Amino acid sequence: MIILLKNQADQKQVDNLSSWLKSMGFDIHMSVGASQTIMGLIGDTSRLDIDVIKSLEIVENVQRVQEPYKNANRKFHAQDTVVSVNDEVKIGGGHFEIIAGPCSVETEEQIVYVAQRVKAAGAKLLRGGAFKPRTSPYAFQGLHEEGIRLLLLAKKETGLPIVTEIMDVNHLPLFEDVDVIQVGARNMQNFELLKELGQIRKPILLKRGLANTIQEWLMSAEYIMAGGNEQVILCERGIRTFETATRNTLDLAAVPVLRRLTHLPVIVDPSHATGYAHLVKPMALAATVAGADGLMIEVHNDPPHALSDGAQSLTPDAFDDVAKSVFAVRPYACR
């Protein structure tokens, strides 16, 4: 349920209403906008009499919310959420950034060189896999703790905040110095992991599952936000369909759909979505114009010899070209 308060509502009355609702066991999410204040109620509101609340002097209107996600719902939070990384890089609310780097961290030379090149091209965050979920148990699984150490070394060399994927809740202590924790598609519904990430105060990049609906995706974000961590970035990375011409099917319609449903920032990963380097540029441009708040792009110094996902990785020179094109069309994005 959401309660729309009148403009310039008496603060004492607002506090009294809030105290009364809390005494009944409801959690309250206050969203103060430029022209309207929204009081969002989280809990079983079936026992509340809407007419009684509507009769209060400070109340403009009351609406029941049908969607099962509350914290992530735009009805509860009309203004776009801006996720801030180290008080330097901002994503959402008109702030657009590119996250770039290799699928897997392989060597010190590789990750530092790629970090330097993507930064020079305009990327503001460095991605790199230290723990790699692979379909085959015989494929390269990442360098684990050593991979995180090398990412931190690249951060020291370039100043770029780092983004890397967590596989297991027991790995959390290793991520203390990681700036943005990524939850991959295979873990989107790892609810115990999501609950633990809700207890920390660090940005979480939540990728859409391989075959999950938008509502299921938002419910996963709700798990994180219900714990108190509202710094969630959604990442569309393609879904599994009957089509085999691309690795996945990039659901670009999800971007404007999500902009209506949620206040959380939405970025797009055209690398995993398509699976082919030559498709990254057109899909990156399309995602930008569709209104995405950012992109996540795989870049490798030597794609043919990459230990994972070389076919979809751009060379640094190719990334330069994509970044220039993306920034050129950014002013024309749908907002």
Image (tube, grey):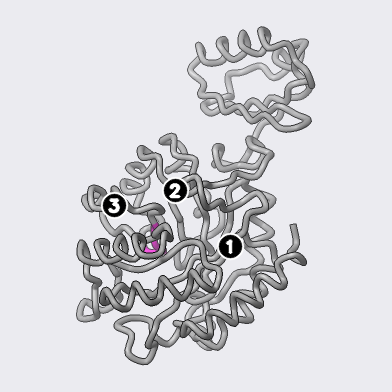
In the image, farthest residue toward the bottom: 304
Decide: few, some or many residues near mark 1? Use Cα within 10 Å; few <14, some 14-19, many ≥20. many
Label placed on residue 175: 3
Residue 8 visible (yes or no): yes
Q: Distance between the residues labelled 3 and 1?
A: 23 Å
Find numbered disc 2 in the image and state the secondary structure of the residue it sits on. Answer: loop
Decide: few, some or many residues near mark 2? Use Cα within 10 Å; few <14, some 14-19, many ≥20. many
The residue labelled by disc 1 is 294
What amino acid is found at the position of numbered circle 3 in the picture?
Phe
Q: Distance between the residues labelled 1 and 2?
A: 15 Å
What amino acid is found at the position of numbered circle 2 in the picture?
Pro
**Residue depicted at x 62% and y 47%:** 262
**Residue depicted at x 31% and y 50%:** 177
What amino acid is found at the position of numbered circle 1 in the picture?
Gly
Is 183 covered by the magenta stretch?
yes
Q: Say if mark 1 contacts mark 2, CB within 8 Å.
A: no
Q: Distance between the residues labelled 3 and 2?
A: 12 Å
Q: Where does the image place residue 169, in percent across and percent down from the top left?
A: 26, 50
Quadrant in which the N terminus is drawn = top right
Up/down of 150 relative to 1, above or below: below
Mark closest to the chain's N terminus, 3 or 2 = 3
Q: Nearer the viewer, residue 104 or 111?
A: 111
Mark closest to the chain's N terminus, 3 or 1 = 3
Label placed on residue 68: none
Q: Is residue 317 left or right of residue 107?
A: right
Q: Is residue 22 left or right of residue 66?
A: left
Mark closest to the chain's N terminus, 1 or 2 = 2
The residue labelled by disc 2 is 203
Find numbered disc 1 in the image and state the secondary structure of the residue it sits on. Answer: strand
